[in-house]
Image (cartoon, rainbow, N blue to C red):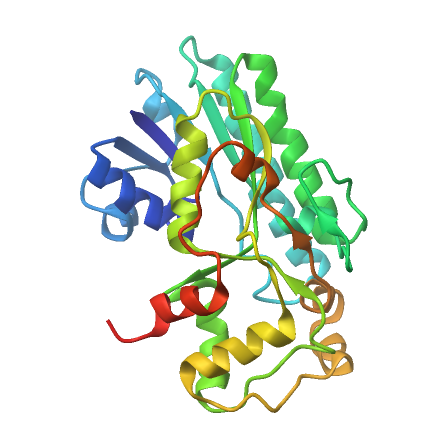
Amino acid sequence: MNILLTGGTGLIGRNLCHYWQEQGHRLSVWSRRPQQVAQLCGSQVRGVGRLEELTDEPLDAVINLAGAPIADRPWTRARKAVLWDSRIALTEQLLAWLATREQRPEVLLSGSAVGFYGDGGERELHEDSPPVGSDFAAQLCGAWEETAQRATALGIRVVIVRTGLVLAKGGGFLKRLLPPFKLGLGGPLGNGRQWMPWIHIADQIALIDFLMQRQQASGPYNACAPQPERNGEFARALGRELHRPVILPVPAFVLRTALGELSGLLLGGQRAMPTRLQEAGFSFRFIHLDVALADLLGPH
């Protein structure tokens, strides 16, 4: 297949590129720094700075994962604008370009996050569950999904992937957690009862490939393991794997003072379930958190 990725130099995008290169697919990554694409994604991956460079090439699939990191700094007004433009404005630009093409891809798989639902409390959240909150993350995901869905008017099958917390070596959520936990300074956030819908990077890559190639797949899918964990249990599991104590909870007021509105992303949670993925026949390799952490952090 001939596949175009946005966000190809991010954690999920890089792993997808390496996986699909091994499968023999042809890959292009639309990037602000196209000269870095081959180094980050693989020597056979083409970096393009302008979509017009692909005008004459047939495309089978577009994977739209671009977006500035949502949790790496407080949500100032300027930061919110960056987060919005890097998702919604970029997706609008992508759709405008697709509309000009005579040959269009069979599928657009576009990113989202379980933050779509807002802080779900104790509710089980399935793909047909409406948002239960209207915080900035929920608004951002909702607008991103709505924009991507417009591609159906172009005759393109649209798949939305609502990703949880991706666990991977050397990147993402774990990369930020490991330093304090290795020092024995890690602990639950707030009361530790908020749900954390996690997923191992191997399952994230496999489910994207599964949904891209499954012609019956369309609409939203929760990309998270079938057994979410509460934040406190996640902290204890990580401490066990690292053989470190977990005795220092981070009080909610400290997070609110330091991070402002962003703290809601850490103190809230989603008990999201991958209902539609399992109904479609996708099999997770990593269902239990202990097994996933051992695979990523244990001796090999």
Q: Give whichever of 32, 152 is nearer the camera.
A: 152
Farthest residue toward the top?
102
Q: Residue at x 38, y 36 (%)?
A: 209
Q: Position of residue 166 (x, y in %)?
A: 48, 57
The answer to which quarter of the image holds residue 1 is top left
- Would residue 33 appear left or right of 273 to someone viewing this image? left
| In the rendered image, the vertical position of residue 272 relative to residue 21, given as above or below | below
Q: Quadrant of the C terminus?
A: bottom left
| In the rendered image, the vertical position of residue 193 relative to residue 269, given as above or below | below
| In the rendered image, the vertical position of residue 63 relative to residue 141, given as above or below | above
Q: Position of residue 276 (x, y in %)?
A: 58, 36
Q: Residue at x 74, y 45 (%)?
A: 139
Does residue 6 appear anywhere in the picture? no
| In the rendered image, the vertical position of residue 143 relative to residue 62, given as above or below | below
Q: Position of residue 2 (x, y in %)?
A: 30, 25
Does residue 265 appear anywhere in the picture? yes
Q: Position of residue 119 (x, y in %)?
A: 76, 57
Number of marks in the rendered image: 0
